[in-house]
Amino acid sequence: MRPFEVALVAASLRLSHAIQPQAKNPVDGQEFRDLEWGQLNFLHTTDNHGWHGGHLQEPQYSADLGDYISFVSHMRRRAHEKDVDFLVVDTGDRSEGNGLWDASDPKGMYTRRILQQLDVDILTTGNHELYNGTTALNEHLEMVPFFGDRYLSSNIDINWRGEWEPFANRSLKFVTPKMGFNVTAFGFLFNFTGNHPITRVKPVATVLEEQWFKDAIADKEVDLFLVAAHIDVHTLELQQIHDAIRAANPETPIQIFGGHSHIRDFKVFDEKSTALESGRYCETVGFLSLDGLAPEHGPKPKDGGAITTFRRYIDFNRPGFQHHSGTGGANFDTPEGLSMSKEITSYRQLLDLNRLIGCAPQDFSLMKDPFPGPHNWYSYLAETILPEMVRNPMRDSHPRMIFINGGSQRFDVFKGPFTYDTSFLVSPFTSRFMYAKDVEWNVATQLLDYFNNDASPYSASARAKGDLPPLDKHADYDDAKQPRNVMPGAQIPLGRRKKQKQKKRTLVKGYTTNDDFGHDGDDTVHEYFEKYPTPKVLQSNASFPADYATNPPPVVDVVFFDFIAENVADGLNAIVSRPDAWSRDMFEMYMGREDTLTKLILEFAAKEWGRDCV
């Protein structure tokens, strides 16, 4: 075989596997659960957080946005061939959490260029689009005009010209091209309070009472209400939205797409209303189909007829995309998809994201290994990294307790190359260190219990700020447990129509989701893995005397993220029973403003881990 023929064969083989140069190929021989198409079909993504280059160290999620663009194109073709409708939805948090977003100046410069090539029908805003004023303004000035009426933000305003105006389109009524369904769509964010002052987020309950919303849901010509929401599917806000629409439309189907809590989940509200949430970090593409919206016999759903619903969680890799789109390695990639993959590669090179910092000596996980424990990242932070790196030369001899919120750490560390990009995946936030000087020992030692027992900063208000820790109420399915099975009325899960054939299969560890339709939602048959609780707040001790257990120091420095400064003040005040003893403005910076935890982790990896990756 001549050299150019070898190259062509190699290229064609590669097309069926990972396409980014640093990505790994998924394991061959995995078993897929097929999709069930209906009259109206959806693909859904949420909480991608800039992971558009794919998971370079996790083969199961190694597809990039170019692969997804090709997948969408083939799914649209399949819908056209089946003469059914097909819509693509994204429910926000496209920003923050990956070097493609975080390493550029301004942040997100290249990601916005990438996302403008995404073929999407409806999209909405997440809380991470609103933390930073520049990010919010760029989203409003660049992304909203590009997507036009398709970009929905029903409860968000912006003030950049001296007066408040809608951040994006409040609602959209449209007719599907194939079957002519009348759809009215909304885009909601949860009751978020951590947004930059250039924006405001109206409480969902307030918007439901506004006249424009009442007029929109009073329209009797609507065949389906579509809600694209950056909201966990089990929260009060979504229940309020559902109930308001249902009160005005007792029979009209309502389809909700959720987000924010980084899980795969599906909720049945009633016999004609469900909500799908499709994971995080470009690990998952949600597929949902509705059938019976235009029945050949009998009444339409809004006139009392039944509908059937199907949901599936698709792993973000090329073999899965090829399987579900009915394509092979030679005909999967589209010109648009290949162009996007090449563009992502060039941006990663431009931002120097592949620069090797050090070689992680082992895997460290956030929740796949118990905390405390030798393979848990929080343990390694508390015992090794924080005491070594969080230092003030002027106070280094003073004993210090260091506190960080657990939600600040976002992803696992894998054995091998730890790159510039990895630092953003693991610790993406610009968290800086402040401190309270010379706090009495018997006060400081009560802080961790205060944080763990305090509901406000780490549940309700932390959720409003957007600092939502991983939820354990939606535990992955365990074969030893009985799945939930909630199917009220005529709501029929299409996936139960056929039994899967038993055959030899290759299992990889992955999501084994249990939701309101049971435990067969994941497209790939995975091996179950245990998830362990993560700390709400992590404490690390440094410069303690060797005999501190029997002879504790009289005072210590309490060092903490600026993000939780108000919570620290509240805790100290509660412990000493003096409501005004401490306030945020009494705290000082412990290190420089440039000394974020992300930077300190990079410095630690360069110093301690070496660069000889085996």
Image: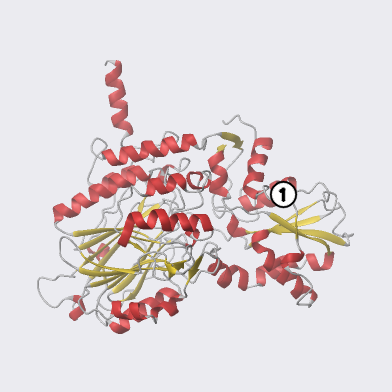
Query: Image height check: is 130 above or below 114?
Result: below
Q: Is residue 383 left or right of residue 548?
A: left
- Name, please, the residue furthest toward the left: 297
Residue 34, picture quadrant: bottom left
- Percent across and percent down for residue 99 are 51, 44
Res. 291 in view: yes
As rendered, which of 328 and 217 lies closer to the eye? 217
Name the residue located 51 percent from the left edge and 38 percent from the top edge: 353
Total marks placed = 1
Amino acid type, callout 1: Gly
Q: Which quadrant holds the C terminus? A: top right
- Name, please, the residue furthest toward the front: 162
Name the residue located 25 percent from the left edge and 59 percent from the top edge: 499
As rendered, which of 484 and 201 lies closer to the eye? 201
Res. 312 in view: no
Query: Image height check: is 445 above or below 372?
Result: below
Name the secondary structure under disc 1. loop
As rendered, which of 75 and 180 lies closer to the eye? 180
Q: Which quadrant holds the N terminus? A: top left
Q: Residues within 10 Å of mark 1 (few under 14, many from 20)?
A: few
Residue 457, picture quadrant: bottom right
Name the residue located 86 percent from the left edge and 52 percent from the top edge: 545
- Percent across and percent down for residue 138 are 45, 54
* Residue on which the image places disc 1: 592
Residue 11, picture quadrant: top left
Query: Image height check: is 449 above or below 350?
Result: below
As rendered, which of 46 and 144 lies closer to the eye? 144
